[in-house]
Image (cartoon, rainbow, N blue to C red):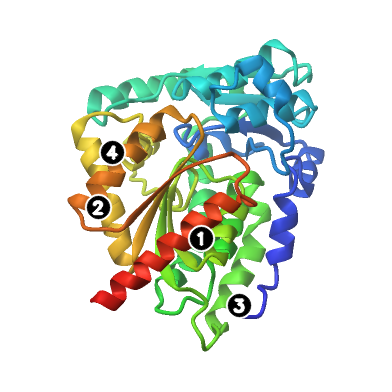
Amino acid sequence: MKDLQHLYYFEKLLEEVNNDLVREAQNKGSIAIGAVCFQIPEPLINLPGCFSVRLRAPRTGSIEMGTYYMSSMLCEGCRAILERAIEGGFEFLDCIIAPDACAQMNRCVENIERQNLCSKEKFFVEYSDVPMKDDETALRHYVRQMRAHVLEPLNKVYGIDISDEALRKSVDLQNKISRLITQIGDYRKEDNPRITGYEFAVLCLATYCCPKEALIEKLEDTLKELGTRQPDDKKNYRAKVVMVGSEIDNPELIKLCEEAGALVVADRFCFGSLPGRSEIILNDTEDVLMQICRQYMHWGKCPRYMNTAKIKERQEYVDSIAKEYKADGLIYQQIKFCDYWGYERASAFHIMREEYGYPVLSIDRPYVAGNSGQIRTRIQAFVESLELKKLKK
């Protein structure tokens, strides 16, 4: 297939956290907010006058200093982000807003705060408690936390408008992005998709890393381009898979997977599009913050939700998207030493295979996995097993 018109543009944006669009927005006076978890609802940190930037460590090399401060037994992603902060990579941030969800990420953010690795005069860090269950009691607590530790600090320190009108405007902006990403992603359902998993991962990741309004025009161009794009006559894959698990903030892992023959047609991982780019539906009667928090709580597919109903919901959700996107198998992956996804991956490997009937590949991967020969070999072997299963049928 011919390369997408704007693919190189989006790839360049992902090469730095402080990319051109981030700098441009800050030059216009917008506040840059560091985001580390899906459980801080995006509309709350993309209000008029501010925008969220997902903390990542692209082109990571050594993580020796991050390991020194956090130990070698903690998540490599958290250590890499701390390493980048020590290098001065997040000096541009005006604040970091983190949930008290992942203890390892919190240690990373605490190191950034205590070592003064972001030195702007008004820089601050806020932590908030987020739900571990999906019920009305948890929702009320969630709303109080988001008001006290997200909205009010932004208003007090930077004068950000946190009114219902501002929240609705932020939701409208996110919904525009979500509709575009969803429509682009729907082309992955085709028998011979006209967009690869890598291309989609680049586009989706950019929407978490840049001011959203700056991406709309090029996403619209891409959607229009895909409407007439013709896939290669010969299918460019040997099997279709759903990628499930901890965050993937480097599309090179998806590229490696597809070079090994497995086309990634659905992304059920942290900060992915399913369900992260679903639309937020608001009514005119309820409190806007309550509605936003409820939808994020219901969307939540993080293994931090440990009650039986949520565990079953995660399994059924993966089953439903595997069927919707006509996947041949599932790849469950986690960054090394991720506690939550470590347990989820181990259990899902058996449950999704034995109870739901899917071939499953389980991967414990380094943070930088795009050049891993071992992972490439394992995916190639998994693809061959899927092909053999088709032949037997």
- Give the mark nearest the N terminus, 4 or 2: 4
The residue type indicated by label 2 comes to Arg
Q: Quadrant of the N terminus?
A: bottom right
Disc 2 or disc 1, which is closer to the eye? 2
Mark-to-mark CA distance, 3 and 2: 38 Å
Pointers 1 and 4 in contact (CB under 8 A)? no
Residue depicted at x 62% and y 54%: 252
Q: Quadrant of the C terminus?
A: bottom left
- Give the mark nearest the N terminus, 1 or 4: 1
Which numbered dot is residue 353?
A: 2
- Give the mark nearest the N terminus, 2 or 1: 1
Disc 1 or disc 4, which is closer to the eye? 4
Q: Could you say where residue 106 lies in the image, as x and y percent from the top left?
A: 54, 20
Q: Could you say where residue 352 lies in the image, as x and y percent from the top left?
A: 25, 50
Q: Residues within 10 Å of mark 3 (few under 14, many from 20)?
A: some
Q: Could you say where residue 219 lies in the image, as x and y percent from the top left?
A: 61, 64
- Give the mark nearest the N terminus, 3 or 2: 3
Which numbered dot is residue 225?
A: 3
Pointers 3 and 2 in contact (CB under 8 A)? no
The residue type indicated by label 3 comes to Glu
The residue type indicated by label 1 comes to Ile
For mark 4, what is the residue? 347
Q: Could you say where residue 257 lies in the image, as x and y percent from the top left?
A: 53, 59
User: How many numbered markers are drawn?
Assistant: 4
